[in-house]
Amino acid sequence: MNKKFTCALLFLALSVPYAVFAEADEDQADETEAATEVETEAADEADASSELQSGNGWKTVRIAELGNSGKKVHMVLVEQSRHTDKTIYSNAISRLCQGEEEFCRVRFWSNERFIPERAALTAEQNKQLKADYLVNKTAGIKELRWSCGVDPKSQNCLPN
């Protein structure tokens, strides 16, 4: 009987710490997983808020990637009533291209329904385009083209 009692105590002595540590590991794993989820959600929200910027008279509706190049095209909506105010475009370009020295493209519309889901434009979307800004240092390009409706005097205006 004494042997059985000793074995039972020995078993309990060894199994209790194992159970306690196993439970602590599970709690720690749950806490780590929860913290990772919170960090991921916060990072996603920060990315979304930093990418979809806005300003006085304009807002970024979406950002599309050019193929698989990693280069982005900012699709911007300009207030319809202020679409001829060039300072709005200038402000948006300054904010969106800040820190983008190699490549930056910003396209502007005054009607949200014409803003494309992808970087490629249909004929109608291109017709409704109010301005197109492009900097590509590799190709040696830096240009801002206006819709003839925004700047009828522009020598390089976009067709309407």
Image (spheres, grey):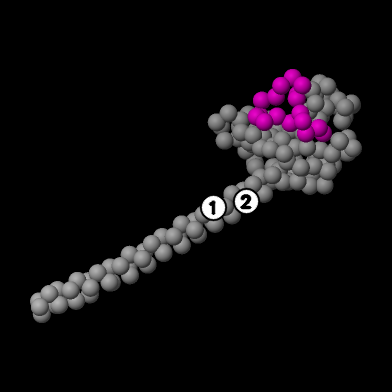
Residue under the image location 41 percent in, 60 percent down: 29
From this view, report whether residue 145 is shown above or below residue 25: above
Q: Position of residue 115 (x, y in %)?
A: 74, 31
Is residue 146 found left or right of 16 in the rendered image? right
Tag 2: amino acid = Glu
Residue 141 on the magenta span: no
Q: Residue tagged by mark 1? A: 40
Could you say which quadrant of the image residue 57 lies in? Answer: top right
Q: Position of residue 134 (x, y in %)?
A: 70, 32
Q: Considering the image in quadrants, where does the N terminus appear? A: bottom left
Determine if residue 20 is in view.
yes
What number of labels is visible? Answer: 2
From this view, report whether residue 81 is shown above or below residue 49: above
Determine if residue 133 is in view.
no
Which stretch is magenta?
110-126
Question: Most extreme residue toward the bottom, as rendered?
Answer: 2
Is residue 69 found left or right of 33 in the rendered image? right
Q: Which mark is residue 45?
A: 2
Q: Position of residue 63 (x, y in %)?
A: 66, 37
Dot 1 or dot 2: first in sequence order is 1
Tag 1: amino acid = Thr
Given residues 128 and 140, the one toward you in this image is: 128
Could you say which quadrant of the image residue 138 lies in? Answer: top right
Residue under the image location 38 percent in, 62 percent down: 26
Residue under the image location 88 percent in, 38 percent down: 82
From this view, report whether residue 155 is shown above or below residue 26: above
Q: Considering the image in quadrants, where does the C terminus appear? A: top right
Give the crowd class for mark 1: few <14, some 14-19, many >=20 residues within 10 Å.
few
